[in-house]
Image (spheres, rainbow, N blue to C red):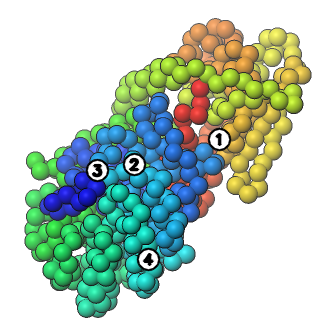
Amino acid sequence: MATPGGLCFRDITALAPMVRVGTLPMRLLALDYGADIVYCEELIDIKMVTCERVVNEELDTVDFVAPDERVMFRTCERERDRVVFQMGTADPDRALAVALLVEKDVAAIDVNMGCPKEYSTKGGMGAALLSDPDKIEAILTKLVQGLSKPVTCKIRILPSMEDTVRLVQRIERTGVAAIAVHGRTREERPKHPLHCDFLKAVSGAVGVPVIANGGSLDMVKSFEDVAAFRSATGAAAVMLARAAMWNPSVFRRQGLLPVQTVMEDYLKYAVRYDNHAFNTKYCLCQMLRDKVESEMGKRVKTAQTLSDICAAYGMQAYYEEVQVLLRSRRGLHPPETPVTLGGVTTMALRFHRRDYPPEITPKMFLLEWCRKEKLEQPHYHTVDRPQDRLFLSTVTVDNKQYRSTLWEKSKKGAEQAAALVCLRVLRLPEGRRGEEQQQEEESGLGGKRKRAVAPPLLAAAPPQEEREVNKKIHLSDREAETEVSNGKHHKTRMP
C-alpha cells in the first residue's frame, strides 16, 4: 500500500543511506539494477538550510548549492519518485526548513536517528537522539504535519528489547510512513551479530512498515538472500548498505554481475553527472575490496581526475564523448555579460582543471598573448577569506583589471579564474580540451605543448601541485567529506 505521498515501503528493497557512497551515481546504478527505493547519504541540516535550489541545465540535474558554491545535494528526474532525502538534525524547525527546500524534488524525507559516528552524533544528531525520545517525537511530528511527502526515520535498537519496542511504538504515533531499524545497538559494529529477534519483535509491534537493515555481512550475499532476511526479521522491507556498496548488482533478481562490469557502469554515471573524482575513487575502491592493491587498484588510487580514472578502465573514449556533449550543452546558453565596476571587469567564471589538458592553462595562454603583443606580463593580486579559506584574484593586463566573482579553493585556482575572465572578455583562446589545435595555432602555444619540458611556462601553474593543494583542502574535515560526496562545483553558473 502506497503512502499519501505515493511511495510504497512494503515488499521493497532499498539502498541504505551511506556517507560518501549514496551520491547520485550510486543511487542511479542501484535503481538500474532493481532497487525500489534509494536513500541519499546523511546531509546535515545546518549546511543544507543555507543552500539555494538551482536547475543545472548542463547536467540536467537539480543542485542544492551552498553559499561557497559547493553542491551539497544533486538529484535528477530519473530518481525523483524513488529517492529518499536523509538529513541529520536535532532541531524541529530547521529540519522542516530543509525538508521544505527539497520536498518537491524527492519522494520522501528521512531523519537519521541511528548513525553512531561522531560527525553525526555531535550536536545531538544521529544515534544521540535515541536517548532523547521527546526530541525524536518533536522532530517527526513537525515534519509529518508540515509536509505533503512521506516522513520516515532510521534508528538502531536499544539495549533492551522492551525499550526498543516502546520507542518504535512512540515513533509510529507521530504519523511516520515507515521506520528503518538497524539490528545493532549504538555501541555495536558490523563484527557483532545482528539481533534478528529484536527486529522481529519490532516488526510485530507496529502497523507501519519496518525496514530491516544490518544483514549484509552474514545474511545477504545476493538478491536471493533478501527474502530469507526479510523472513528472519519479519520485516515489511529490506535495506542494504555494505552488500550494495561492494556490488550494487545485489539488487538484480537475475543475479550478481562481475564487479568489473559494475565498476564500469558506475563510472559512466560518475562521468555523466560530473561526480567529484575523489568521491568516485572512494566508491570504486569499496567495490575493489581485497583487490584494491592490485594493479588496477593502484591506478585508481593514484588517479587525480575523472579523466585519469577513465584511463585506468580504458574508458577514455567515453569520457571524451561525454565532455563533447556537455560542451555542446554549455554552448546553448549565452555567455554571461561582463560587468565593469570601479575599473574592474568581472564575470562569474570558475576554473575547472578537468576542462584543460595537463600542459595548458588559461594563465599560460594569457601570458603568451601578452608576450606576443609586447605587453607587460600579467600581474595577479590575490586575497583570501579567512572564515572559509577561499581565494579571489584580480589580474592586471595592459593597465586593465579582470576578476571572477566566484571564490576559489586555492590561490592558483583563483588566478586561473581571473585569467579566464580576461581571455573571455578579450575573446582570446582559452586552451580548453577539444579546441587545442585551433587555439594553439592562434596563440603560438602549439610547439610548447609538444615539448616534454618547458620550465618558464609550466612553472606558472604546475597541474600536479594544484591537484595536491586541492586534495588537501577537500579532505581536511567532515565538511570536506560532504563536498567530496556531492561534487565541488555548481556548473550552471558558468557560461
Q: Are marks 4 and 3 in contact (CB under 8 Å)?
A: no
Which one is in front in this view, the residue at disc 4 or the one at disc 3?
Answer: 4
Type of residue at label 4? Ala
Image mark for residue 138: 4
Left or right of 192 on screen, residue 379: right
Label 1 vs 3, first from the N-terminus: 3
How far is mark 1 from mark 2, CA to CA?
38 Å
Image mark for residue 242: none
Q: Are marks 1 and 2 in contact (CB under 8 Å)?
A: no
Type of residue at label 1? Glu
Q: Which residue is outermost to the front? A: 145
* Residue 131 or residue 255, whichever sits in front: 131
How far is mark 1 from mark 3, CA to CA?
38 Å
Type of residue at label 2? Lys
Which one is in front in this view, the residue at disc 3 or the one at disc 2?
Answer: 2
Label 3 vs 2, first from the N-terminus: 3
Q: Are marks 3 and 2 in contact (CB under 8 Å)?
A: no
Label 4 vs 1, first from the N-terminus: 4
Left or right of 38 on screen, residue 51: right
CA neighbours of label 1 inside 10 A, class few (<14), some (14 to 19), many (20+): some
Q: Secondary structure at mark 4?
A: helix
How far is mark 4 from mark 1, CA to CA?
47 Å
Q: Are marks 4 and 1 in contact (CB under 8 Å)?
A: no
Q: Residue at x 47, y 20 (%)?
A: 328
Q: Position of residue 17 (x, y in %)?
A: 35, 61
Disc 2 designates what residue? 104
Q: Position of residue 449 (x, y in %)?
A: 63, 19
Image mark for residue 466: 1
Does 120 appear above or below 351? below
Q: Position of residue 149 (x, y in %)?
A: 34, 57
Image mark for residue 82: 3
Asked which quadrant contains residue 49, the reply is bottom right
